């Protein structure tokens, strides 16, 4: 607890000093992300467009095919490589060529269908148990190969939108939900299985199957509901979630609840606002007991019962002018507290057999310990106009390990981006961000949007 108090105090003293050191003329403001919106939603026309022109545009039927092709090559140096007798066989590399193909079919009156097929190709010769996307050799990823295949296909999303008189809106199918205000951590989100990737926050995730409903009451109140049918064999296996979002002045708040048969209900609250050009948000969940199965150091399993289990994240973000360029620097920090996190270092305490079981079924990346923080820094127009510098630090303060990303992103032509990142794994051996054995890595990513 003393480490938590010291860390929390230092982090927010640092952020407060940096955030209020300069006040730009134009700062970023948190947008109200609609839980039913996605990258394919229609852009709102300019204010000077006539109403009839807007109506005509919205009523147009269209079919579009868009996508993104991405190639990656990464190399990771093992700790033993820097010993007196280095062995290249101890190091790991990953290479991947993938694509997201998106079909968008729009009818009149807001009816729509959308599908995203993800294709991944990994050349033969790599270990079949290797994880080909994510932070590093031990990071979360999308593509896993069988022993006789080098191609992976994932239907990430496929859904239909419909409405009743533009009063009640429905989305049926496999979909990614925007649930909660947190940037990286979302303690109120018990729906999405595919979590955010710290190495690529814009990565398209795999959705879940179900029905969601949106009922807006002007701009002051919106009600949301979701029936989660992923993997359900019977109606009794469905999970249900509801949320009410409302606005008071420049403060946006939300109350949510999640429930499923044989599980304890989970309640959530989130809030976001802007104060003195600083974006501020918080998100928290609370349950009496926990629905996550955990492992003891002897390999036995258990769940937390008859205890209040809170999870909380708090974030700040500010933009700064620099060298006569508005909002050139972005600084953001987010803190996460997980009551249900492990006190023990499971990577040291478990036997070899139990550790493999733990990592395969009971280890939840970036949700394993009790105290976390992430710091994001970006500088646009770095060296040249089309290049940006990005630094991200993700730390587990329960076991004192961290992952550090430092890289540049270069866009020589529109819709083509080249990114180079150096990735460091900081901390003693056998910690959350060091258990893979890697100490430093380099990752080259090429991305083309069409």
Image (cartoon, helix red, strand yellow):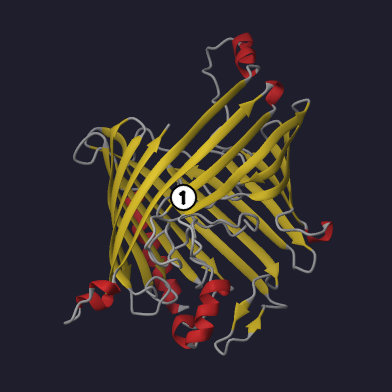
Q: Is residue 275 left or right of residue 286?
A: left
Residue closer to the observer: 75 or 406: 75
- Quarter of the image with the C terminus in it: top left
Task: Classify mark 1: helix, strand or loop.
Answer: strand
The extreme left residue here reads 84
Residue 391 at x, y percent in the picture: 31, 53
* Residue beneath the point at 65% across and 55% down: 191
Where residue 303 sits, quadrant-wise, is: bottom right
Q: Is residue 364 above or below residue 193?
A: below
* Residue beneath the point at 55% across and 43% down: 117
Residue 277 at x, y percent in the picture: 42, 41
Residue 59 at x, y percent in the picture: 66, 17
Residue 342 visible in this rendered orientation of the protein: no
Residue closer to the observer: 153 or 229: 153
Where does label 1 land, which residue?
120
* Residue beneath the point at 75% across and 68% down: 263
Q: Is residue 174 left or right of residue 42?
A: right
How many discs appear?
Answer: 1
Residue 136 visible in this rendered orientation of the protein: yes
The extreme front residue here reads 148
Residue closer to the observer: 188 or 89: 89
Residue closer to the observer: 413 or 131: 131
Q: Is residue 53 left or right of residue 8?
A: right
Residue 311 at x, y percent in the picture: 59, 65
- Neighbor class of circle 1 (other Cα within 10 Å; few <14, some 14-19, many 20+) is many
Q: Is residue 392 left or right of residue 369?
A: left
Where residue 12 sits, quadrant-wise, is: bottom left
Where residue 310 sits, quadrant-wise, is: bottom right
């Amino acid at each position: 607890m003393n480490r938590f108090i010291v860390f929390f105090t230092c982090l927010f003293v640092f952020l407060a000093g940096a955030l209020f050191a300069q006040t730009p003329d134009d700062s970023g403001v948190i947008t109200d992300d609609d839980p039913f919106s996605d990258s394919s939603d229609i852009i709102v026309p300019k204010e000077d467009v006539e109403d009839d022109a807007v109506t005509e545009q919205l009523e147009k039927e269209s079919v579009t095919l868009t996508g993104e092709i991405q190639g990656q090559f990464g190399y990771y140096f093992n700790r033993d490589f820097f010993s007196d007798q280095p062995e290249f066989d101890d190091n790991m590399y990953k290479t991947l060529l993938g694509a997201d193909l998106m079909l968008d079919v729009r009818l009149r009156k807001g009816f729509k269908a959308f599908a995203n097929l993800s294709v991944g190709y990994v050349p033969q010769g790599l270990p079949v148990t290797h994880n080909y996307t994510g932070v590093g050799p031990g990071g979360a990823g999308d593509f896993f190969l069988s022993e006789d295949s080098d191609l992976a296909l994932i239907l990430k999303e496929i859904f239909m939108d419909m409405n009743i008189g533009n009063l009640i809106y429905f989305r049926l199918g496999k979909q990614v939900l925007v649930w909660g205000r947190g940037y990286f951590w979302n303690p109120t989100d018990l729906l999405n299985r595919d979590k955010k990737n710290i190495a690529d926050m814009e990565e398209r995730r795999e959705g879940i199957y179900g029905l969601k409903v949106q009922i807006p009451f002007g701009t002051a109140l919106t009600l949301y509901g979701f029936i989660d049918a992923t993997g359900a064999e019977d109606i009794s296996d469905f999970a249900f979630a509801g949320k009410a979002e409302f606005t008071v002045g420049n403060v946006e708040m939300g109350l949510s609840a999640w429930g499923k048969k044989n599980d304890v209900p989970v309640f959530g609250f989130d809030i976001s606002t802007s104060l003195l050009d600083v974006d501020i948000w918080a998100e928290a969940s609370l349950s009496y007991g926990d629905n996550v199965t955990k492992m003891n150091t002897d390999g036995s399993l258990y769940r937390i019962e008859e205890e209040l289990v809170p999870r909380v994240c708090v974030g700040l973000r500010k933009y700064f002018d620099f060298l006569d360029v508005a909002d050139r620097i972005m600084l953001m920090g987010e803190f996460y507290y997980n009551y249900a996190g492990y006190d023990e270092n499971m990577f040291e305490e478990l036997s070899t057999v139990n550790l493999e079981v733990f990592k395969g079924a009971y280890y939840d990346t970036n949700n394993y310990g009790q105290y976390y923080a992430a710091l994001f820094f970006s500088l646009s127009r770095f060296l040249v106009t089309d290049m940006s510098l990005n630094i991200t630090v993700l730390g587990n303060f329960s076991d004192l390990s961290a992952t550090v990303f430092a890289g540049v992103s270069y866009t020589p032509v529109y819709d083509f981006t080249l990114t180079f990142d150096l990735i460091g794994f900081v901390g003693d051996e056998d910690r959350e961000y060091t258990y893979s054995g890697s100490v430093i890595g380099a990752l080259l990513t090429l991305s083309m949007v069409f």
